[in-house]
Image (tube, helix red, strand yellow):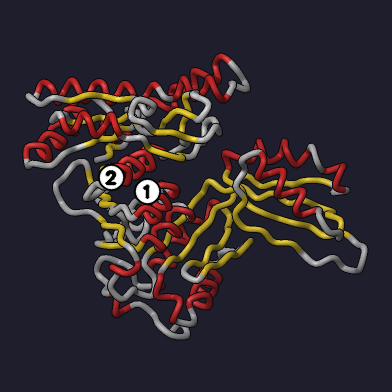
Amino acid sequence: MKFGGSSVADAGRIKAAAKRIVDRRAAGDEVVAVLSARGDTTDELLEMAEEISSAPDPREMDMLLSTGERISCALCAMAIRDLGYEAISLTGSQAGIVTDTSHTRARIVNVRAERIREALDEGQIVLVAGFQGVSIERDVTTLGRGGSDTTAVAVAAALDAEVCEIYTDVAGVFSADPRIVPDARKLGTVSFEEMLEMASSGAKVLQLRSVEYARTHGVRIHCRSSFDEGDGTIVVGEEDSMENPLITAVTHSVDEARITLIGVPDSPGVAGAVFGALADAGVNVDMIIQNEPESEGSKADMSFTVASEDLRDARSVLEGILEGQGIERIAWDEKMGKVSVVGAGMRSNPGVAATVFRTLGEQGINIEMISTSPIKISCVVSADRVADAVRTLHAAFALGEDQSDSEQPHGAAR
């Protein structure tokens, strides 16, 4: 059972989470709970660091940021004990979560769950601090935003758990963000493949790496609300999916930045040097486009997108290699957004791209960049038009609560 920051934001919610954990234990289940930091604790810790240093050391940032989840676990263990059950709180390192050495965005390489198993065998409820581990060099590490989801899935895999329940402030995974599309429909099941595409294109209910880990290790995920007992959304393997609708969901992000390299030499190795340097700095690149040079030996322009939070690092890296690679200059736009349509059914149905482009065109929404996969089409648009794009595409594919799957347009965008 994993509880996010909003689910443990104050004393009342911690006690409610403790009651929910105890109820599962009373029903006869062995329970491990992974907790996030309370509410805005992580943001507050980041602000503390910025007050002290303009460029905090990554190792010390991990020491600082890992404290939030430890507080949540210790408090919840106290609440569980007050309810009459034995509980023990563990840090990521005590729980045996081993990571690589990449501070602030480490990846889990192993879970040595012996101490968790021993505590369960003694009848205890185990509370594990999410978002953190210990590196192979014995330093505290953190897993990046949303890392508690990955902690929970990794522990579930190590223990061969029946299910990994992700408790959050929404009732499950929806066909679009309900804050933008009021009639968005809660999805009963989603395939791992679809969930991966949704998470990578802006859906924040589940963290991308947690879904990747779950698919790799065969962990069943149930995403559900902390505040009611209803069923949520179950993420299942493709072999367990029923026949897929044409489009499952419309996702979005407004945390995109576009970088354009102007005057890129038309010579081998330049692109490799650019994206190799970005990769070495831990900057993930999404869409890439390059125009063809006008004539042999002339220069081209290359544009690509990165997460807004990575823009500063990306600019720093690129400014360091411009001259050496013969690139004239760099430009950027911080106010970009991305809207995507996702659905396993589009593999066997033509016309989805036509519907997307026509629908956005009719609304006067200019498409800056496009990328596709077999089950996703993503468009970069101006950030101030993202909400309009989500609403119009959701309606165009008839994804609303009062519209059946049979109403979805099929074939050549009828």
Placement of 21 over or under 252, stated as above or below: above
Tally the marks: 2
Q: Residue furthest right?
A: 297
Q: Position of residue 351 (x, y in %)?
A: 49, 81
State how far apart marks 2 and 1 are (Cα). 8 Å
- Tell me what residue is drawn at x 86 percent, y 56 percent: 265
Q: Secondary structure at mark 1?
A: loop
Q: Which residue is mark 2?
A: 166
- Tell me what residue is drawn at x 23 percent, y 21 percent: 75
Tell me which amino acid carries mark 2: Ile
Disc 2 to disc 1: CB gap under 8 Å: yes
Tell me which amino acid carries mark 1: Leu
- Tell me what residue is drawn at x 79 percent, y 37 percent: 320
Mark toward the start of the polypeptide (2 vs 1): 2
Residue toward you, 367 or 51: 51
Q: Which residue is mark 1?
A: 206
Say the numbered circle drawn on residue 287.
none
Q: Position of residue 367 (x, y in %)?
A: 60, 64
